[in-house]
Image (cartoon, coloured by chain):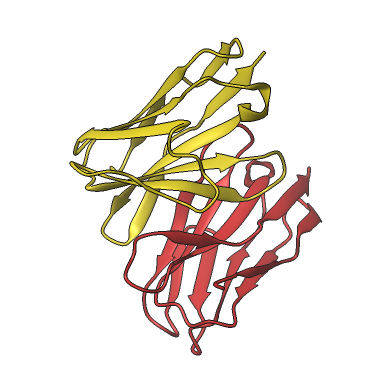
């Protein structure tokens, strides 16, 4: 149980375009989901907390107009990287909260050319 | 701020050896979690600890929640090549939110 999926697993896009990443909890409902970014050889950096039916809460320094988060249902949250630039290239990971534990998706590798 | 100090940063061991890594904090936490991350994958939850002094096992893995609530260790016994990866400790942030505070990770290499 407690499986979280992400789609796509990797994506390459051109500068200036937008990319949407989906995060789904497959066998449980998650009121709260989280979006992280991970740079090579570093720990996970929390970008935002996504709550079903309400606006996401962004961490300090994360541009909310650039990283649009929508938590449309108890099993789906999406992250849209708008007007992507090469510096947005990274590994993006979502997680879903079940009681006091977070279960992570497999991650999405974004490369912006 | 809330920080977790995880050590060692990396370990190189021979297959069959036991491994120990730990996390400490200057703050008290009520939940300690241990995750493993394989390259190009998301972290996988290994063990969750909820009570000070609690010792929990998951196969060859054993983790303990320190009695002061400021530390935790993870032991791996009889290591095998598939134990290779990065191990992270994490705690539930104080203040009632569900956010996690992460350690910087311990990279484990197992030589066959």
Position of the C terminus of chain B, as image quadrant, is top right
Q: Residue at x 35, y 57 (%)?
A: A101
Quarter location, residue A22: top left
Query: In the rendered view, would you say B17 is above or below A107?
Result: below
> In the drawing, does residue B12 fall left or right of residue A2?
right
Return the residue nearer the eye: A56 or A28.
Answer: A56
In the image, the chain rendered in yellow is A
The percent position of residue A9, horizontal first and vertical second, equals 49, 21
> In the drawing, does residue A65 fall left or right of residue A24?
right
Position of the N terminus of chain B, as image quadrant, is bottom right
The percent position of residue B69, horizontal first and vertical second, equals 48, 84
How many numbered circles are shown?
Answer: 0
The percent position of residue A86, horizontal first and vertical second, equals 67, 22
Return the residue nearer the eye: A113 or A97.
Answer: A113
Outermost residue on the bottom side: it is B68
> In the drawing, does residue B70 fall left or right of residue A78?
right
Query: In the rendered view, would you say A87 is above or below A49?
Result: above
The percent position of residue B10, horizontal first and vertical second, equals 77, 56
In the image, the chain rendered in red is B
Q: Residue at x 45, y 33 (%)?
A: A67
Query: In the rendered view, would you say A82 is above or below A38?
Result: above
Outermost residue on the front side: it is A65
Return the residue nearer the eye: A39 or B1.
Answer: B1
Q: Residue at x 66, y 45 (%)?
A: B85
> In the drawing, does residue B51 fall left or right of residue B71?
left
Quarter location, residue B17: bottom right
């Amino acid at each position: 149980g407690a499986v979280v999926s992400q789609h796509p697993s990797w994506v390459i896009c051109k500068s200036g375009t937008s990319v949407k990443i989906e995060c789904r909890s497959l066998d449980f409902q998650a009121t709260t989901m989280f979006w992280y970014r991970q740079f090579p050889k570093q720990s996970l950096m929390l970008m935002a907390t996504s709550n079903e039916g309400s606006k996401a809460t962004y961490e300090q320094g994360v541009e909310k107009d650039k990283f649009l988060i929508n938590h449309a249902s108890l099993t789906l949250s999406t992250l849209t990287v708008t007007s992507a630039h090469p510096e947005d290239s990274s590994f993006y990971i979502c997680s879903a909260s079940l009681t006091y534990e977070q279960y992570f998706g497999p991650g999405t590798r974004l490369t912006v050319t | 701020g809330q920080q977790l100090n995880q050590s060692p940063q990396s370990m190189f061991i021979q297959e069959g050896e036991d491994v120990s890594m730990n996390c400490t904090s200057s703050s008290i936490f009520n939940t300690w979690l241990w995750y493993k991350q394989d390259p190009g994958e998301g972290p996988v939850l290994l063990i969750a600890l909820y009570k000070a002094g609690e010792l929990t096992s998951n196969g060859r893995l054993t983790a303990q929640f320190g009695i002061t609530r400021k530390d935790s260790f993870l032991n791996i016994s009889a290591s095998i090549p598939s134990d290779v990866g990065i191990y992270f400790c994490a705690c539930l942030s104080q203040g009632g939110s569900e956010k996690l505070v992460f350690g910087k990770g311990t990279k484990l290499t197992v030589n066959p």
